[in-house]
Amino acid sequence: MVTPPTSSLSTVTAATRQPLLYAALAFAAGIASGVYVWRPPLWFIIAIVVFAAAAGYWMRARPILARVMGHAVLFWLGCFSIQVRPPAAFPDIANFSDGIEVVITGHVVRTGILRDDGFGALRQTLDLQAEQVQREEISSAVDFGVRLTLYSREAQQADAATAPRTVLYRYGERISATAKLRPPRNFRNPGAFDYQRYLEEKGIAALGTGKAPEAHLLPGFVGSRLELWRQAAHEAIIEKIHALWPPPHAALLDAMVVGDDAFLNRDTRIDFQRSGTYHILVVSGMNLSILAFVVFWTLRRLRANEMLASLLTVLLSIGYALLTDVGAPIWRAVAMLTIFLGTRLLYRERSMLNAVGGAALLLLIADANALFSASFQMTCVSVVIIAGIGLPIIERTSQPYRRGLRHLESPDYDASLPPRVAQFRLDVRIIAQRLTRLLGKWLPLRMIGAISRAILSASEVLTISALMQMGLALPMAWYFHRATIMGMPANLLAVPLTEVLMPAAVIAVSVSYISLAAAQIPALVTTLALDGITGMMRWVGGLRVADWRVPTPDLAVAAFAAIALFLAVSLAPRRRVLACAGVAMLATASLLLAFHAARPHIRPGVLELTAIDVGQADSSFLITPQGRTVLVDAGGHLGFVHSEFDIGEEVVSPYLWSRGVSRLDAVILTHAHSDHMGGMHAVLTNFKPRELWLGAMPETEAVRSLLSQTQALEILVRRPRAGESFEYGGVTVRILSPEAGSISSDKPQNDDSLVFQLIHGNSAALIEGDAERATEHRMLAFQPRSDLWKIAHNGSSTSTIPELVSVVRPRIAVISVGARNSFGHPRREVLQRLAASGASVYRTDVNGAISFYLDGSSISSPAAALH
């Protein structure tokens, strides 16, 4: 006879107190407030003392009021901690970053990574702690981090056997390299990724480029032997992965298992993002949780006691975090796992939210700035959703039935179970009884039990996946501008396959150290799981609905989503009707984030032109007096630059989303050079404009690809030509170039540019693309007098001829140009001509995104711009 456990359907229906969770929320609120509301530190100290004294005074007489005072203390502590944090101390490298080559001596702190640059050369990227910089004859002792890229042409050598091989520099080695240094620079637009701060967090103060043959290994070792071992182990695991799986699979497993994304291409990343399964591709808390669960479950099955199993699981998790070298996200997951397993040992299994709050509080005390990290926020929200909403719902729905599937052969077990679970067991036995004639006495009951467990497991995965998609809708919309509508069905298959893939991959790599042949079995299991994930990801990612992008949510919608999440967590353990109401509110918030059209941030009745900072490229945003939104060019890399960084996706689109734009009325491509059309594919996909206006376009492969995309998206293509004039959105559009049938070459030319003037009342703006002298001489016939002039070709001397300057007579000239570009743009003679005409000159490399407003009679200053 089996002794039944005490169990009921209401295991977690009673709400439990989570003091550490509320403490973490109060501390986080203080940090957030302290960033935006500065006060002298003494004020916060006084507030802390006063509220702490009040909490102590009311502790016995009014405990609720005392708790409120205690949370207020934590709030003021949060304010104090963020305002007294020491500023980041990074050296000024201006003396070494003026474009002149220097000789850097230092030691490697991150082993180099070799890649093909796409032009027959190899590039090695490594992190170097500089010790000395020599410029000409002067040497200076320094101490700052450099992310150094060394290029080698050896991939083009005819005789590979005799060609010199690139030396891969490893951690701790000292090297000397000739390179050009430059400071990291952000694209200075609203919504842009803070690349400079990202590098600062990794200790990088400068970027450098040099030639691999001019780098030399020096004697000596500088660094930690423990870190040397860690990086060597990391590299050894990657070597094993590439020995067990072909390159496409190995690249994915590098990222999923050990957090190395060096071999991933951009298309793969985007496919995972579109399908809502990107969290599977990167080492995260989920990967660690899966491995920890497998380790803990295995140790318990091997009869290890709970304390030993918990200790070994934590130690192995720490070892895994060390090997992956992912950084803060994985260590946060280790901290939360450690606290959770510790609470289990104290017989507090129902206090997961308390454990999450405690871990978050400790992390914020250690680093208050972590609060503003997207990974920190999403990690905490994910765990809160699972622990605070998912588990209470599962405990009262599927879990009682899962427990009811134990010991199906024992009717005595039925007596202590809730009536409907006992009835469920009876139904299972009746069905099994009818199958005994076909399958024998013992098989039917076990088979039906296994099928029932699989169905219940699938329902739990679906429930958690749905709740995760709803709960993470706000950070996904805010940071990544994605509404992962297909995330729930995609994760329904991807998460269980990941639960198979992770332990199978770890087993395969571990066994390969003993025998590569024996490792083929778990490697095959890994391959099948990986093929299932990628096949599903490509199918879901290929659906048009998977491309649903959203602008930055309005503050009211964001606040509603945050409140909905809080209420869903608070109500989940309570009565069924309240729990359903909380989930319904969360679902409503996620739908609002996906489908509520944010209002674009515009000034009605005026013509706006914003020059977007896209580096040494060109992109401008127009809003007409009637609210029509128009993008002119989409930036891109110069033709000789090979990079997977998509300026349209990473720079132009975030700016438009930050302005609340979800769809463009028109996109204008002035001409087909890569620094104007490189980002166009992403812009068309993300904003699905109604019209595309084109300059003179030779039939190149890039142009054909773009036209094919416009046809698939059902975008109307217009080809306005010189002499045309029409009304659009409350402005008069005058086309000044190109002339009809004026394609002069089978390759794109600057003089192919679509040049036009926008006239609003008595004010006008002139936009030239990259038009050069020949086009500008023809433009003189139109007498394009304009208040605002978007200068052609980044301020090159091939444009902005003196005759046109005297005709246009601009009040303001704006130049889109990259900082420290190799062309010397804008040219001095161009700046002198504009200054002589009395124009005020603004540049994106100096001013970032610059907005100007023409109201029909005057033009506003950039001081009133939206940025």
Image (cartoon, helix red, strand yellow):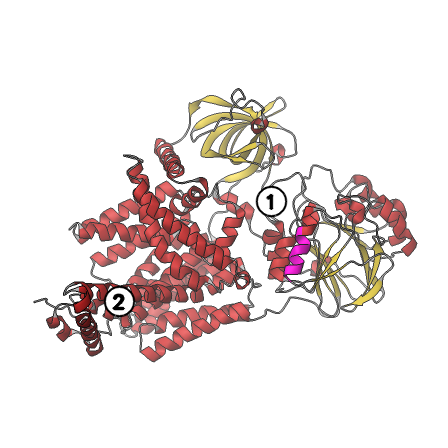
**Picture quadrant of residue 428:** bottom left
Please identify the dominant SS of the magenta region: helix
What is the residue that sits farthest to the left in this orientation? 1
Residue 43 position within the rendered picture, expressed as x and y whole percent measured from the top left: 46, 60
Q: Amino acid at mark 1?
A: Arg
Residue under pointer 1: 185
- Answer whether residue 51 is visible to the viewer in this image: no
Mark 2 lies on a secondary structure that is helix
First in sequence: mark 2 vs mark 1: 1
Query: What is the magenta range?
Result: 705-713
Position in image of residue 160 (x %, y %):
53, 24
19 up-or-down from 577: above or below: above
Question: Residue 452: which numbered mark, if any?
Answer: 2
**Residue 235 x/y as whole percent:** 39, 35
Q: Is residue 710 magenta?
A: yes
Q: In the image, what residue type sits under mark 2?
A: Ser
How busy is the neighbourhood of tag 1: few (under 14 within 10 Å), some, or many (20 plus)?
A: some
Q: Quadrant of the N terminus?
A: bottom left
| Residue 475 at least partly seen | yes
Distance between mark 2 and mark 1 Cα atoms = 57 Å
**Please, is residue 809 above or below residue 210 in the view?**
below
Is 810 left, or right, of 533 in this rendering?
Answer: right
